Amino acid sequence: MTENGDATPLVSLVGVNKHFGALHVLKNIDLTVDRGEVMVVIGPSGGGKSTLCRTINRLETIDEGQIIFDGIPLPEEGRALARLRSEVGMVFQSFNLFAHKTILDNVTLGPVKVRRKPRKEAAMRAMELLDRVGIASQAHKYPAQLSGGQQQRVAIARALAMDPKMILFDEPTSALDPEMVQEVLDVMIGLARDGMTMVVVTHEMGFARRAANRVVFMADGQIVEQNTPDEFFTNARTDRARDFLSKIL
Ligand code: ADP
Ligand code: MG
């Protein structure tokens, strides 16, 4: 529950099914994400984790079921969909910064173009956010001049600049050199502490233990089990989850 006492989930998926041709990639998914919750989604490759994230902000359509965001069924298209997308931040494995724009422009572009924020105001806010992720001194550089860890921190600042109601992270540290993983996780842990609603696909168990309220284990398009990190890591209930954990821990 949030400080203003709103106990309705921020996101509810009810009976969600999706196919890619003959492949049944999401099988009857029922899932809620509470306000302020940090949910870690783990599971074997090909299990449907990325597709699940993408359906939440309608980068993918669904065949059956319902997705309710902040009390409103997800719109199919048009302005309502654009508005919803701007309220759900997304951070990908591959940063996806605009290569020919400066770091500062990468962070101001969304607020100026989508939110019609005055450029000066957007730039001031962007500098605050870049400071928060420890990149303010790099604001006038271009993405290629930054390390992977720095670029991913910029991607997080860019998501935050839209004042999202939640942020989806799809394997945000998988493409990073090992020595850069922690600096990105530290930013994410900070966001979690500040109450941001987050869905994080990751195999970083340290992050899950420190920041997650819940771990959701997904395999073959299904939610196989979900529990608190402590319970899940020490007492997984299914063979499928125990087998997976034995391979990654
Ligand atoms: P995960 O993120 O858990 O690795 P994904 O959601 O990426 O899983 O993929 C689930 C399954 O759907 C995989 O078998 C993958 O090959 C397939 N898939 C994902 N995207 C597409 C697509 N655009 N077209 C066809 N098949 C896809
Ligand atoms: Mg994936």
Image (tube, rainbow, N blue to C red):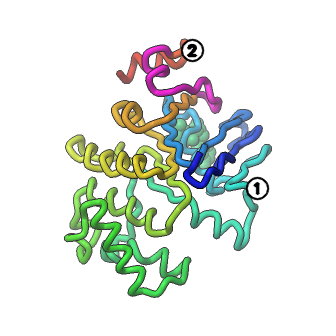
Q: How crowded is mark 1: few (under 14 residues within 10 Å), some or many (20 or more)?
A: few
Residue 169 appears at what percent x and percent y?
Answer: 46, 49
For this rendering, which residue is in front, 202 or 193?
Answer: 193
Q: Where, by quadrant of the figure, is residue 96 drawn?
A: bottom left
Identified by mark 1, the residue type is Pro
Nearer to us in this view, 51 or 115: 115
Q: Specify whether tag 2 is near ligand 1 (CB below 8 Å).
A: no
Where disc 1 sits, the SS reads: strand
CB under 8 Å between callouts 2 and 1?
no
Q: Looking at the picture, how far across and down is residue 155, in whole percent?
A: 38, 61
Q: Mark 1 points at which residue?
A: 73
Q: What stretch is highlighted in magenta?
A: 219-235
At a point 25% along the width and 61% down the height, the residue shown is: 134
* Whole-percent x, y for residue 153 in the image: 32, 58
Ligand 1's image quarter is top right
Q: Does the image show residue 153? A: yes
Residue 113 — which label? none
Any magenta on residue 221? yes
Q: Mark 2 points at which residue?
A: 238
Query: Of marks 2 and 1, which one's residue comes earlier in the chain?
Result: 1
Q: Extreme front residue here?
A: 4
68 and 5: which is toward the camera: 5
Q: In this view, does 166 lie above or below 114?
A: above
Residue 18, placed above or below residue 167:
above
